[in-house]
Image (cartoon, rainbow, N blue to C red):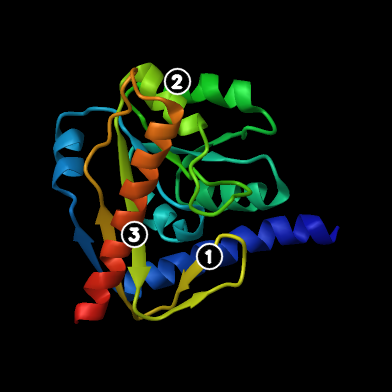
Amino acid sequence: MFKKILLFLGPRLCWFYIQLVGISSRIRFVGHEEHDRLKRENSPFIYAFWHGRQFLMAYFGKKENVRVLISKSRDGEMIARTMALFGIETIRGSSSKGGATALAQMLRTLQSNTRLGITPDGPRGPAREVHSGVLHLSQKTGIPIIPISFDARYKKVFDSWDSFVLPFPWNDIVMTFGNPLFILKSDSLTIASQKLKSALDETTNRGTLLLKRK
């Protein structure tokens, strides 16, 4: 009974808090030119963001034609229900559970020109280390990956495996975008992983530096 109540109330409280942060804060978008160009051309692409930086992605994604990969865990169910309140569809699965089905759904999603959102280090880490799933997907389809991240002036960084960042309301927030990253068929997984990790780290760190300068 308690679990049912939690699954009912939890996503609604998360939705309310995310909305409050988004509406009350000043959000600046940096480095989004190539992202916007691909959108204008109606080209498919894959959003990649670190697991610890996923908080604002639902608020951002509600205006995007995007589906998000979420694990089949209990935490994943909470996240998926929160995403649904923002009108964002999810694909359920991970490398440890439901991976083949999720991969087929992701391929169909990209073929229909719908964008994907993936946490390359999720759902269990290690933090800021890229798993191979998103690399295989980009390499197989030739569809680029766009690194995306955010940072906030006022926030709580949890002592969790992913150092989850929770921004406070009435904040100064920077959302940063990297350039489209193509995983070549000739790239080894090691090279591809290093490419994406470097791009994601640079995108994440850029937002932090911009907030420090002001």
Q: Is residue 174 visible?
A: no
Task: Residue 16: give x, y in percent of width and height.
Answer: 50, 67
Q: Which residue is mark 2?
A: 107
Please tell me which residue lies in front, 107 or 126. 126
Query: Relative to residue 175, is residue 177 depicted above or below?
Result: above
Secondary element type, mark 2: helix
**Earlier along the polypeptide chain: callout 3 or callout 1?**
1
Crowding near the residue tagged with mark 2, few <14, some 14–19, many ≥20 C-alpha atoms within 10 Å? some
Crowding near the residue tagged with mark 3, few <14, some 14–19, many ≥20 C-alpha atoms within 10 Å? many
What's the residue at 29%, 55% (across, down)?
203
Q: Which residue is mark 3?
A: 204
Amino acid at pointer 1: Phe
Position of the C terminus, as image quadrant, is bottom left
How many angstroms separate mark 2 from mark 3 (CA)? 27 Å
Name the side, left or right, on which 147 lies relative to 214: right
Query: Relative to residue 8, is residue 76 depicted above or below?
Result: above
Task: Residue 37: give x, y in percent of width and height.
Answer: 14, 38
Q: Quadrant of residue 102?
A: top right
Q: Which residue is mark 1?
A: 164
